Amino acid sequence: MERTFDERLTVSLTLTIAGKAHEIIAGSIKRFALELWSWGLEGEVEFLLTDNSAQGGKEKDALLADFIKPDLVEVSLEVKAVLAEASARPSHTALTVKGLVTEKTLVEEVVPTTSGATVILHRRYGIRFLDAARVLWRQHFPCALYTSKTLKDVLDEHKGDKISLAYDWDAGLGTSHSLIFVGLDPQRGASFYDWVLWYVHGHMGVWTYDYAAHGYKFAAAKDASGTPLKLQEDNLQGLEVLLPEVIRHDVTVLNATAESPQTQPVTQTQAVAGIRQDVLLVTPISDEVQARVDLETARLKWRGPEMELVWRSFPEKTFTPGALVKLPDNAAWNAAGLAAGEPLRVRSLHVSGEVSEEQGQEEVYNDPSALFSFRMSTRLERKDDPHVDLPAWQPPAYPRYVEGLIVSEQGAEKDETWQAYTDSKTSQDGYKVKIPLFADQIIPAPFNPNLLPGHFYFPAYKGERVLVALGFQNAWIKRFLDWRTGARMPQDGQGVQLLVGKTPENGTALKHFYTDDKPVFLMQRTSAKDTQKIQLDEGTLLIEVKEEQS
């Protein structure tokens, strides 16, 4: 349905390289294309610059030296209508987008001289650019641990000076957490950009690009404020109604704890009987189960109808994704009754133009406007549609593994004691583990038998080296990494032992070893200089109680 039309437009491009701005006007631009979504943008521009200074001319290409440098290139592209289409007294507004260049091309066009040599007369430049977060965060793979921080704190630390963030999502980003781990591995592919989108999707948030502020916004719901812009019928060519696929499944949330297993169905009216998605949890905390039920209930809202609007001329009043608009008030534009008189939200916008073949080169160069062969289409949705449009992303891979040291505040500093800490919110007991790599921050981990059966009660002791598995907002002890002081025995005797107590000088040991290839069993209690032991060896049972003399 989309068609090409000729339109005179003012198009200006500014490239900023290492703080220096290079301005290219419409007369130099040969082609441009923009894809604008609610979450970001991408664009392409090709332009021609003349350089005849070597032949004594006045045109000098000032861009070349900076263009071929590897420096970051910032882009600002502005498109504005020239001729009034819809009103007798127009007040045109410009469509302005900004981004960072990801790809550059350069073709030098040569012409022959009267002497038979060739000289460069024109250079045709090409750039492709994206919004800042998609360029920078897709190369950003931090591995960082945070304690007693909010998600907003984490995002602010990683935004850098090229990405602007705004927040309207206290429930999702403003709550302090005992542990937040951003552990991204370049070998597994999920970048910080993926991580952000994964979090937004998983918590039913909204991530949008603000075309006015040229930044991003996190919100709990779509913005429905503002007065809708009335679209003029003279600008429009056609309308197509799109009906997205409807969700046909229910959800069941399962909690597989042995003491209090739960099965909670989440239903919706358009589901087909017997078709469901099961979500499996293992948690003793009932609030976590209810939070997942609430999340799955929100996810079961199906998408409403959408409208693809095709244009025949560039509008006098420009708009960007996220804006509210209204279609003309007649039957031809009410989308089969789906959009009659109601505000619609712009989801995406496609704009492209190529210099029209009808105008000559002498008309174009150095002209602030040009005649373009032009295309434009817009995707619209209902104002109350809950669907959040996001780009493709992949989930981060958890867990990552680091070493830690068990924390205990019981006894003296040298005592190898154990301690269970009770969480005031969940009433669950846990260890505290210090992570030396991340500035000795202390994180919680479950206080449980780990790999031992329950009739062994051997909590991890103070200072014990452990391998810690770090999830996004949780951690657990994967395994133990060292022997306790004094626990290792000589290899020649093939000895094994069990040490209990605070220190080797204040505890009890059970040992089994070999002397002259004969088994020996020893049980010894030590309290400073006071010792008691029972020793069984070949033909001997020794019971001894003594106090060492000073």
Image (cartoon, grey):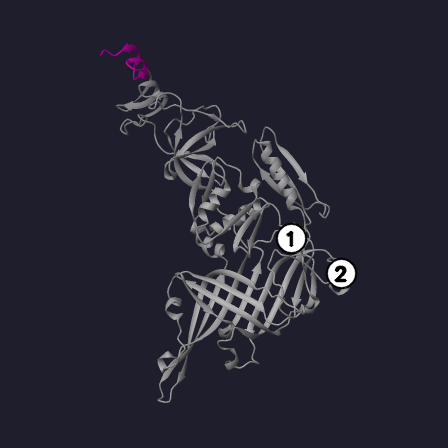
In the rendered picture of this protein, how many numbered marks are placed on residues? 2
- Tell me which residue sits at (45%, 65%) in the image: 15
Q: Residues within 10 Å of mark 1 (few under 14, many from 20)?
A: few
* Residue 545 rendering spot, x and y as whole percentages: 30, 10
- Main SS category, magenta section: strand
Toward the left, the furthest residue is 550
Mark closer to the chain start, 1 or 2? 1
* Residue at disc 1, secondary structure: loop
Region rendered in magenta: 526-550
- Tell me which residue sits at (49%, 41%) in the image: 472
Q: Which mark is residue 226?
A: 1
Q: Is residue 539 magenta?
A: yes
* Residue 456 rendering spot, x and y as whole percentages: 45, 24
Within the image, what quadrant is residue 419 found in? top left
Looking at the rendered structure, the kind of residue marked 1 is Gly
| Residue indicated by mark 2 | 336
Where the C terminus falls, by quadrant? top left
Q: Does residue 346 appear anywhere in the picture?
A: yes
114 above or below 27?
A: below
Given residues 247 and 508, the one toward you in this image is 247
Given residues 262 and 545, the one toward you in this image is 262
In front: mark 1 or mark 2? 1
Looking at the rendered structure, the kind of residue marked 2 is Ala
Q: Which mark is residue 541?
A: none
